[in-house]
Amino acid sequence: MAKQEDQFKKVISHAKEYGYIFPSSEIYDGLSAVYDYGQNGVELKRNIREYWWKAMVQLHDNIVGIDASIFMHPTTWKASGHVDAFNDPLIDNKDSKKRYRADVLVEDYVAKIEGKIEKEVAKAERRFGESFDKAQFLSTNPRVLKYQEEANGILKRLGQSLEREDLADVKALIEELEIADPETGSRNWTDVKQFNLMFGTKLGASAESAIDLYLRPETAQGIFVNFLNVQKSGRMKIPFGIAQTGKAFRNEIVARQFIFRMREFEQMEMQYFIKPGTQKEWYEYWKEARLKWHHSLGLGEDNYRFHDHEKLAHYADAAADIEFRFPFGFKELEGIHSRTDFDLGSHEKFSNKKLQYFDPEENKSYVPYVLETSIGLDRMFLAVFSSALQEEELENGTTRTVLKIPAVLAPTKAAILPLVKKDGLPEIAKKIVDELKWDFNVDYDEKDAVGRRYRRQDAAGTPFCITVDHETLENNTVTIRHRDTMEQSRVKIEDLKSIISKETDMRYWLQKCEVTA
Ligand code: ATP
């Protein structure tokens, strides 16, 4: 467990150090469960999105994309069931009549324990002066360890009760810890109730005319409300799919796992409209197709498993998650849901508009059934990034940190390095950059010894390093070094483009998994 936590901490700090992910508004101490993607992160995210889009839209002649708005008519969320059933726990104080998030009360209690740890650190810092080793103190001081254990135990129990939807235990925890209303000190609590996860906002210039809206908690509804628009304008025949990527917002309670659970995140969803009665076949088809897509990236097949839902959502007649082995264990990465005709049927009722398809083969109209694949882009990012980060022992006894991001997704495909900063080598290296940049993201680096530059590129995830040396002046060849094997070979400058293409081209990767089947 401690090893897993260490690995997770390394992932978070590496992501920051190498420009992948920063806490949001960090200069103001950040915003909980909100993150920004840096210069490398934005490229990796773009490449994952593109890899998904190509597999789903471009390679399927019966799947098209849309880009619906984040704001939707508020009735959408009544019809979808989110207004009534998209909830988390809330507690009221009977004396003060104040309302709190049950989990936040417990988290604040834990924060106080953490405050005590900070006080111990400050005290010890004063006592030991310059020789103070904070890391060692945190891992050995008995009082700090006791506080830490207490804090971890409370958070664990809270997480487990929420996971089980055991609201009575959340209340019991609050009572056992003797948590009082922060404003009045009263411990007279109501039972814990559910709290809706949607973020509300207002549309309109004046308070009187403003209407209440929600930030969408999923992208799927933008597809359902456009079902007929796309079907008619695209003359689509069932079965057909509509895909979309975009932001979704949830006021999450348990939001302590970096980009695994964010309050603002991005989804990549596809709704596949099918004939009622064929849902079982399509469910199996999409489970397999999606797993193949994951396997095509080579992150290790034993890092994935299916988890079939026993407790089904109100809209589903079958559902499974593709789980991934994250640094904190196997957790949901993607959901495959057989949503029946719940959504279109419900939008028909609420809108009083027919949302049906005329099937020329059956010579009748019906509300199609829907098979959905829904994956979090940020979670996919975390899957790729966390499994890519490795420490390797080398033959010479040293270790190297390497980010083995699949070459097809790597932010920078190649770094061009002049061996020395003279003798015309930088000029040739820059000419190579100028040529390759039309096809790939490439980097130029001339600072430090070449060995250090290799390490830097390994840690940043760059699959190829191309070194220009004195032999280049004689015969127009360079060395190309592969990140994963560290093998080097001598190649002609004119062959670089095709060598890099071969290993970074989406065609090469996607063909491996036959997702077009
Ligand atoms: P969980 O059980 O982890 O809360 P969910 O079952 O609510 O997830 P869905 O509503 O099925 O998730 O959403 C589909 C996908 O969107 C999930 O598989 C996940 O990859 C992603 N996702 C959902 N919530 C978040 C979040 N708060 N942060 C990042 N990604 C998310």
Image: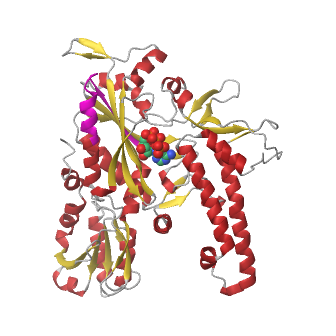
The answer to whether residue 360 is above or below residue 394 is above
Q: Is residue 300 left or right of residue 92?
A: left
Residue 218 coordinates in the image, percent (x, y): 47, 37
The answer to which image quadrant residue 230 occupies is: top left
Quadrant placement of the C terminus: top left
Is residue 357 or residue 139 the one in the foreground? Answer: 139
Count the numbered circles shown: 0
Task: Identify the residue shown where x is 27% and y is 45%.
Answer: 54
Residue 377 coordinates in the image, percent (x, y): 41, 48
The answer to which image quadrant residue 132 occupies is: bottom right
Is residue 355 or residue 58 the one in the foreground? Answer: 355
Q: Is residue 289 left or right of residue 349?
A: left
Q: Is residue 386 left or right of residue 515?
A: right
**Can you see residue 61?**
yes
Residue 203 coordinates in the image, percent (x, y): 61, 30
Residue 231 coordinates in the image, percent (x, y): 31, 24
Q: Is residue 25 left or right of residue 216?
A: right
**Can you see residue 246?**
no
The answer to which image quadrant residue 42 occupies is: bottom left
Is 278 colored magenta in this rendering? yes
Is residue 428 or residue 358 the one in the foreground? Answer: 358
Task: Identify the residue shown where x is 54% and y is 41%.
Answer: 250
Which segment did they paint magenta?
268-287
Is residue 189 or residue 232 the one in the foreground? Answer: 189
